[in-house]
């Protein structure tokens, strides 16, 4: 007699346990499903509904209208215009259907069938779901398409808004331009509401005031199925237009500045309100047409012609630094008086040349001007007078005065990311290696100080900086902040305008000297029956950067007693002197300014 279970008994026992195991598995399975449903519907229901809607609803983007740029009198400097593009959606047009659709489009819109084939082969555009076939359709083509669009399945015409500059090249460096964002930029800007088809301000005001001008995207909301097919139209989400921006630029004055530069190979003109720092005109040559960047299709050859041009048309001469020549002598004069070593009443013997180091530095007339003071030294533009002052006070005092007048630093203008801070060489800079050598290997030498005294060699400034510095002598001793849009700020209050730490005698002596320059000196050509008495300083500078022909400069303000405008004129590599080339440029701007006041 066996005491153990038989195999039959064991099999029977195992079969008896199976329903319990199956029940346990089913309970675990349905519990997991229940927990998942609780997690999805109760804990994260709102989020999942949003995600589902996002998968089901598509927004056909509609770009916003960018805000206009207006001059100070409300005249349009930049606006927007509509353009129309013909698209096809490849999901709706098979290879078999394409030839018939192509031929209908070509006949209806008078297009080249081969061109349509080539465009289709290039594939989808930046939005990823449509192929652009033709850009810049004419209004009559758009009307024909709209009349027949029901018979053209898979094809569509969409509207885009492009930036338009009605005055072409006028103030191009100041206004800037817009251009499509890159894929790298899109990855960064998507969180700020930018689309892959968006355009962004690249330089100038367009870039500086991007957030003010751009607006917000809108579009048509469509319901689509899992295959991406449109099921129904859900409505519009209107785009929000950008805000207009009123600039301080005066269109008439800007035209006068551009015209004054017309016969020069290169240069710049800056006109500024000396009391507030408002930029009235800022022109640079060579320049470019910002409408170039609004073209929907641009060839590589066209890009290369602009970006690789040896003339560098995209480079703003108004904010690039050059040797200033004798326009710098006001800084040396200020250093002499402020240091106490050469007070306002100082008189010095001038001569044909003075030796510093191993070089004899000449006066420009080869003989000197006798014993003179600051006012006549500015009037005659005596080099040997200012050599003595500059060498006598030393580089640190010169640098101190230069900094007080805003040199060797950004001006504060909104488009300052394009601005050179310039250079004012001094002992500390030389001891640190002059920006290119090892510290201690390039000592300061007497020849450096002589050159720095008259704005040559190791001194470089921008035309914008010169206008800002001359505003100090025009407005009674205040350093202003140049700007292109008022934006409701008080530009005469600190810190936007600050009092320069300068003796009244220094200010008055330099002002009187600048008046003498125009009344009976190197700036005599500024006098005109149509102009009130003015003040200014001419300058001729060697091109230490490239070794090319001399630069011509002129800085001035008008009227002398109650200045309303400061003008800095610069002619790049234009030998002959500031009085011959730069002064007439500034004079044309002043004539335009006072003429419009008389109207």
Image (tube, helix red, strand yellow):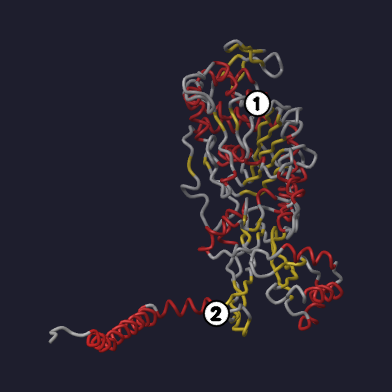
Q: In screen coordinates, is 539 left or right of 491? A: right
Coordinates of residue 126 in the picture (x, y in percent) = 65, 63
**Is residue 296 visible to the viewer in this orientation of the structure?**
yes
Contact between marks 1 and 2 (CB within 8 A): the answer is no
Q: In screen coordinates, is 302 left or right of 209? A: right
Coordinates of residue 511 in the picture (x, y in percent) = 59, 33
Residue beneath the point at 59% across and 83% down: 234
In front: 224, or 294? 224
**Is residue 336 visible to the viewer in this orientation of the structure?**
no
Query: Which callout, 1 or 2, points at the residue further toward the start of the chain?
Result: 2
In front: 1, or 298? 1
Coordinates of residue 272 in the picture (x, y in percent) = 63, 45
In front: 274, or 410? 410
In the displayed orientation, state which residue is furthest to the front. Answer: 1
Residue under label 2? 56
Which disc is residue 544 wearing?
Answer: 1
Q: How many numbered marks appear?
A: 2
Could you tell me which secondary element the residue under label 1 belongs to? loop
Which disc is residue 252 wearing?
Answer: none
In front: 274, or 452? 452
The quarter of the rendered structure image containing the N terminus is bottom left
Could you tell me which secondary element the residue under label 2 belongs to? helix
């Amino acid at each position: 007699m066996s005491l153990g279970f038989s195999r039959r008994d064991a099999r029977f026992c195992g079969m008896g346990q199976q329903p319990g195991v199956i029940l346990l598995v089913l309970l675990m399975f349905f519990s997991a499903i229940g927990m998942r449903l609780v997690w999805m519907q109760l804990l994260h229901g709102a989020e999942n509904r949003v995600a589902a809607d996002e998968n089901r609803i598509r927004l056909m983007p509609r770009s916003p209208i960018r805000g206009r740029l207006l001059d100070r009198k409300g005249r349009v400097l930049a606006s927007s215009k509509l353009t129309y593009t013909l698209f096809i959606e490849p999901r709706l047009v098979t290879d078999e259907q394409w030839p018939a659709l192509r031929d209908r489009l070509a006949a209806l819109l008078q297009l080249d069938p081969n061109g349509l084939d080539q465009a289709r082969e290039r594939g989808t555009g930046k939005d990823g779901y449509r192929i652009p076939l033709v850009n810049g359709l004419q209004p009559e083509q758009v009307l024909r398409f709209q009349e027949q669009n029901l018979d053209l399945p898979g094809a569509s015409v969409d509207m885009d808004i492009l930036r338009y500059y009605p005055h072409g090249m006028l103030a191009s460096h100041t206004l800037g331009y817009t251009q499509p964002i890159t894929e790298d930029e899109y990855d960064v800007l998507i969180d700020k509401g930018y689309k892959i088809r968006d355009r962004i301000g690249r330089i100038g005001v367009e870039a500086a005031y991007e957030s003010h001008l751009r607006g917000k995207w809108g579009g048509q909301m469509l319901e689509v199925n899992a295959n991406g097919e449109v099921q129904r139209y859900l409505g519009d989400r209107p785009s929000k237009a950008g805000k207009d921006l009123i600039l301080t630029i005066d269109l008439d004055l800007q035209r006068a500045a551009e015209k004054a530069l017309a016969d020069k190979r290169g240069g710049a003109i800056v006109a500024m309100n000396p009391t507030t720092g408002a930029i009235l005109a800022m022109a640079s040559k060579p320049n470019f047409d910002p409408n170039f960047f609004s073209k929907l299709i641009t060839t590589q050859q066209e890009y290369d012609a602009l970006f690789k041009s040896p003339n560098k048309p995209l480079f703003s001469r108004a904010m690039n630094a050059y040797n200033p020549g004798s326009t710098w002598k006001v800084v040396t004069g200020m250093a002499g008086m402020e240091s106490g070593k050469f007070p306002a009443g100082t008189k010095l013997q001038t001569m044909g040349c003075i030796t510093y180091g191993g070089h004899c530095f000449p006066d420009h007339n080869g003989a000197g001007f006798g014993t003179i003071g600051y006012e006549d030294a500015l009037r005659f533009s005596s080099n040997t007078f200012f050599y003595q002052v500059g060498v006598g006070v030393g580089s640190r005092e010169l640098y101190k005065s230069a900094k007080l007048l805003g040199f060797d630093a950004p001006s504060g203008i909104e488009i300052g990311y394009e601005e050179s801070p310039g250079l004012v060489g001094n002992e500390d800079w030389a001891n640190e290696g002059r920006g290119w050598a090892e510290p201690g290997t390039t000592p300061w030498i007497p020849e450096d100080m002589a050159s720095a005294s008259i704005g040559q060699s190791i001194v470089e400034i921008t035309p914008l900086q010169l206008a800002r510095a001359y505003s100090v002598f025009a407005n009674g001793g205040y350093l202003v902040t140049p700007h292109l849009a008022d934006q409701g700020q008080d530009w005469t209050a600190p810190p936007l305008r600050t009092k320069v730490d300068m003796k009244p005698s220094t200010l008055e002596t330099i002002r009187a000297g600048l008046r003498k320059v125009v009344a009976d000196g190197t700036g005599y050509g500024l006098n005109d029956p149509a102009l009130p008495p003015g003040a200014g300083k001419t300058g001729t500078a060697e091109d230490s950067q490239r070794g090319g022909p001399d630069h011509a400069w002129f800085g001035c303000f008008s009227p002398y007693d109650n200045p309303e405008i400061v003008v800095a004129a610069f002619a790049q590599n234009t030998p002959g002197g500031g009085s011959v080339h730069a002064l007439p440029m500034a004079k044309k701007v002043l004539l335009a300014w006072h003429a419009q006041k008389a109207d």
